[in-house]
Amino acid sequence: MAFAGTILVTGSTDGVGRRVVEKLAAEGSRLLVHGRDGTRGKEVVEAVDRAGGSAEFLRADFASLDDVRDLAHAIKAEYGHLDVLINNAGIARVDSARRESHDGHELHFAVNYLAPVLLTHLLRPVLGGEKPSRVVNLTSAAQDPIDFDDVMLERHYSGYRAYGQSKLADIMFTFDLAREWDGTNITVNCLHPGDHLDTVPVRAAGIRPSHSADYGADNTIALATGAGRSGDYFHGRRKSRASSQAYDGASRRRLRELTMELIGLAA
């Protein structure tokens, strides 16, 4: 799956993200490997090098918005253009008690949603322009409507609900961003890469995997490198329909206004 270009894959030291990077490693490719674990990051970089590509490991904890800002600054300082941004990093602590990020936000909402939104907006100067760019947001078929009276789930917490809410928010962000960036030489889409992939969160939840991580990686790469329009949600390689709240303009506007305030981009 050779693709000559500069590609950032967040959360790419394990699971689907790692397989995406390893499959895209080829002569002419420049892979930006993101994660929290330097040891695993080094392993991925070495695998890319062996395959004939080049890679750099960039550490950032998506539970900290300051880390996200630092990551975006480092990328913009070093790279003039990103061909592909794959927002893959995420957590699924569905059986654990409620936890908060460094900034005081519910952890799933912070890591799975706020962090990629902030990163994508901050990387706008190196996306599009004279050369096309693609943004792919990984989401899930497990989607829960957002309760705007209790977004951080302080009163009625459920790990499954927190995860599903963050993933629906990713889809709503994708739809909005595709419209906002229409005509900018940037396509923005999202996908559920596959049901019950063989990854750490799935196994930790006691679920028997239905597909390999390779299956999810192949679906992700197909969307990230293929031709197509912007603003769609895919289930694997099939265009699909998300939960109904994603198509409600008032809900998307309310989420967008809240999000911009939380990540400090309201102005």
Image (spheres, rainbow, N blue to C red):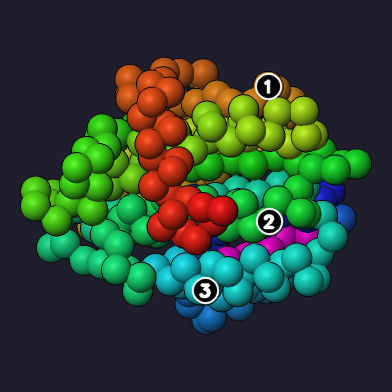
Q: Amino acid at mark 2?
A: Leu
Left or right of 19, for residue 145: left
- Is residue 48 in view from this perspective? no
**Category of crowding for the residue at label 3, using alpha-carbon neighbours closer than 10 angstroms: few (below 14), some (14–19), many (at least 20):** some
- Image position of 175 with respect to 91: above or below: above
Looking at marks 2 and 1 on the same chain, the residue that comes earlier in the sequence is marked by 2
Residue closest to the far bottom: 39
**Camera-nearest label, 1 or 3:** 3
Whole-angstrom CA distance, mark 1 to mark 3, is 32 Å
- The segment highlighted magenta reads 30-34
Q: Secondary structure at mark 1?
A: loop
**Camera-nearest label, 2 or 1:** 2
Q: Secondary structure at mark 2?
A: loop
* Residue at x 38% of width, y 26% of height: 250
Q: Amino acid at mark 1?
A: Arg
Q: Secondary structure at mark 3?
A: helix
Residue closest to the far left: 155
**Category of crowding for the residue at label 1, using alpha-carbon neighbours closer than 10 angstroms: few (below 14), some (14–19), many (at least 20):** few
Q: Which mark is residue 239?
A: none
* Residue at x 76% of width, y 54% of height: 125
Task: Please name the residue that numbered disc 3 is placed on.
Answer: 67
- Is residue 57 in view from this perspective? yes
* Residue at x 14% of width, y 56% of height: 154
Q: Are marks 2 and 1 in contact (CB under 8 Å)?
A: no
- Image position of 234 with respect to 69: above or below: above
Instruction: State the image quarter where residue 104 is shown.
Output: bottom left
Q: Which mark is residue 123?
A: 2
Left or right of 198, for residue 17: right
Looking at marks 2 and 3 on the same chain, the residue that comes earlier in the sequence is marked by 3
